[in-house]
Image (cartoon, coloured by chain):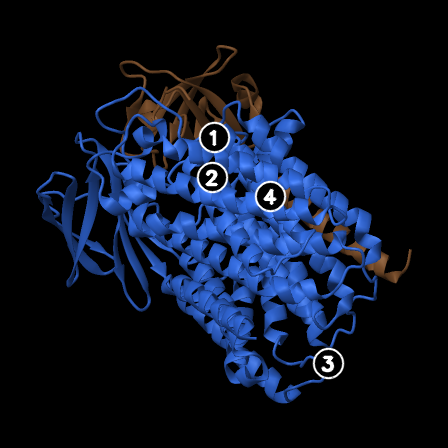
Chain colours: A brown, B blue
Amino acid sequence: MNRRHIVILLFIFAVGAYALTELSVSLSPYVMISQAKASSVSVQVKGKLIKGDGAITQDKQSLHFILKDENGDELPVSYGGEVPENFEHATDVVVIGKYTDGIFHAEKLLAKCPSKYQKEGQNK
Amino acid sequence: MIGVIGFFFACLLSILAFALYLPGGNGKKKTFQAANKIYYASVICTIIASVFFLQAILADKFQYAYVLEHSSKSLGFWYKVAAFWAGQEGSFLLWFLLHGLIGVYFLKKNKMEQPTFFIYVMVQAMLALFLLAKNPFMLAQMQADGAGLNPLLQDFWMVIHPPVVFIGYAAFAVPFAYALGNLLGRQPQGDWIKKSLPWALFAWLSLGAGIFMGGYWAYKTLGWGGYWGWDPVENASLVPWLSGGALVHLLYLARREPAVERLAHFSAILTFCLVLYGTFLTRSGVLSDFSVHAFSGDDSYILLAGGIFIVIGIAFAIFLYRYKSLPGLELPTKTESRAFLLFIGALLFYVIALLVFIGMSMPFFSTLLGSPQNVSASFYNRSLLLPVAMLMLALVFSPIFDWLGNRSVNSLEFYVIASTGMVAGCVLCLFYGLWTPLYLVIAAFSCACLAVHALFSRKMSLPAVISHMGIAVLVVGIIFSSAASTTEENLVFSADQPVLQVYGRGLSYAGANMSEDYRFARYEFSFGEDSLTLLTKLTSDGQLAAKEPAILHEALGDFYLAEQNKNLSMSFKPLIILVWLGCILITTGILMALAKQIKK
């Protein structure tokens, strides 16, 4: 263990500690709907988009829809950002945000299609 | 048919050539000669396959699944050409082709000896495996017309952006092969550095130019107001670029400081491994829950992941096994020297790369650990500020020492100029109302860096001065265009209010018109004395395909009119022109450095 090794270790330790502190504030865990309702921090939820008359509504400020996860729980979501072009065709939707006052306020929305470049439902 | 046969021969012959090179340096000369011939044959087959593939797209042969999915009859010539690399299979074929062509250059000019060339062919064999799993010549049920190219991608920059990125990817295999080949040799030599440097520069140049084009395309086409979204696909190209930057600096340094040879080997190997890792993340489908960009996954990901991790594993096994054969000297620790600054600069590149790497890998690692998580864009926007500030500080000092460790400029003069630059940076922040301390620090250091490089430009090589200034200009542009940007949302015109006051100018709607072929709708606006046009692209069956923003460029910043979420909004992006100017300067600087290396 000479001086060089100590310097290298200290450097790695400092960078690692910095990265971990930064990470811990910005992680949003991937959870089920029941957990999302109980969580006080920002989380990610994946669910099926419920379609049908009046299931998806849009007012001037934001888009409202309902997600259903594998356990059958339902989650009302409100989203104020830009809606992806493929949203209407999406089956699975990932939302990132926080659950407050009975509504999940999404900051980010990912509509999951097979691929941006490929059409839905084709076999490979 | 010839294309398909050529394709399979290309893949199989590449793997065969690799197998024949495998016995290594003690192998018989005849085997090598045969292997060389097979290698040439494999590249010729690749060229044949590529030509036929391109011809299949141009001639609308929709019996091929790829052509059906990525092209259509009505597509213009250049967009048909772009369909070649619009999908997974085609882009792998392009990479394979570029890799093979570079390989032929080395073999023909006899510039790559064994076992270096063996490593190079190993990468090619791996690409051949990918292609066998993702065959671009897959047949589909014949249909009258194809799905066409996503109209968002129908843009000049999107036509040339992917091949430029892939040239960078392919070229990073060269320093990788030289470093590993050198380690496999009996006694590692220093001459691999001189041979690798132009290729590292070329790869860095190409990948950087590709990234810049992608950013510019996003800004002028996507309409969300930015040029960089920290999407996994973007990050997967940024991390190798950062590592490549460290590599270039370490190679320059290693020519004078044998102590960094170990690090230079490590960097050359790591850079290409990061290219492969990024390919794995974005192509295997592990991110498909997290990114709209990433290609979708299917069973072929096992082969992809297997191939990539075997190559990465072999590379690091060789490095660790032969590590001790490299001189383990004291690293440059004399703080007042150019060597130390270069060394610190390279390390800072790696700190930034590591942070981006952690962010982009988070979904993958956390899935492995059983609780999938992702980081938000704010992770990058916040955590990178400190290392970027440090990098800018290191850049401020870069002209003051020469290679021999002497101070090449007068201290007083240097500090006066640097302080003036810092004050100028603070004034700029004041003007745009930017008060966050770290932004202020970064802007101040960047302006100091510009001032110092401009006034002491003779103390360093010109390419370095230009690219360093490019980095400073780029950083200033990024900080101001994002942190000082403002937006006026929900602009609605009505009968009582036909003219809205936005940013002190009158904005009014001046009507819409449709192009003759019904593929473009133009919405005209007048803004002050200028006119703005929002362009909406439609697909052939009249569906909405893409909405492009209208941008008015002015000296102080851009006015960015876009329709988002059925709402019209206008943003002011201060100094965004500096982002593009910085990119151009960096590219020019690296190009000049490359020209200098080639001349030698």
Residue highlighted by disc 1: B134
Q: Earlier in the sequence, mark 3 or mark 1?
A: 1
Question: Badge 2, how many Cα within 10 Å: few under 14, some, many 20+?
Answer: many
Q: Nearer the viewer, residue B39 or B359?
A: B39
Q: Nearer the viewer, mark 2 or mark 3?
A: 2
Kindly check if marks 4 and 2 are in contact, taking CB atoms under 8 A apart as contact. Answer: no
Q: What chain is tagged by disc 3?
A: B
As drawn, B243 above or below B253:
above
Residue highlighted by disc 2: B92
Residues at marks 3 and 1, common chain?
A: yes
Question: Badge 4, how many Cα within 10 Å: few under 14, some, many 20+?
Answer: many
Question: Badge 3, how many Cα within 10 Å: few under 14, some, many 20+?
Answer: some
Q: Nearer the viewer, mark 3 or mark 4?
A: 4
Q: What chain is tagged by disc 4?
A: B
Q: Of the numbered discs in the image, which one, if any, rests on residue B123?
A: 4
Residue highlighted by disc 3: B405
Inspect the image, locate mark 1, and give the three-letter code of the amino acid beneath it: Lys
Question: Badge 1, how many Cα within 10 Å: few under 14, some, many 20+?
Answer: some
The residue located at (28%, 31%) in the rendering is B61
**Which image quarter is the N terminus of chain B in?**
top left
Q: CA distance from mark 4 to mark 1?
A: 16 Å
Q: CA distance from mark 3 to mark 1?
A: 53 Å
Kindly check if marks 2 and 1 are in contact, taking CB atoms under 8 A apart as contact. Answer: yes
Q: In the shown orientation, is residue B237 left or right of residue B499?
A: right
Inspect the image, locate mark 3, and give the three-letter code of the amino acid beneath it: Gly
Q: CA distance from mark 4 to mark 2?
A: 13 Å
How many numbered marks, from 0 up? 4
Residues at marks 2 and 3, common chain?
A: yes
Q: Dot 4: what SS?
A: helix
| Farthest residue, direction top | A72
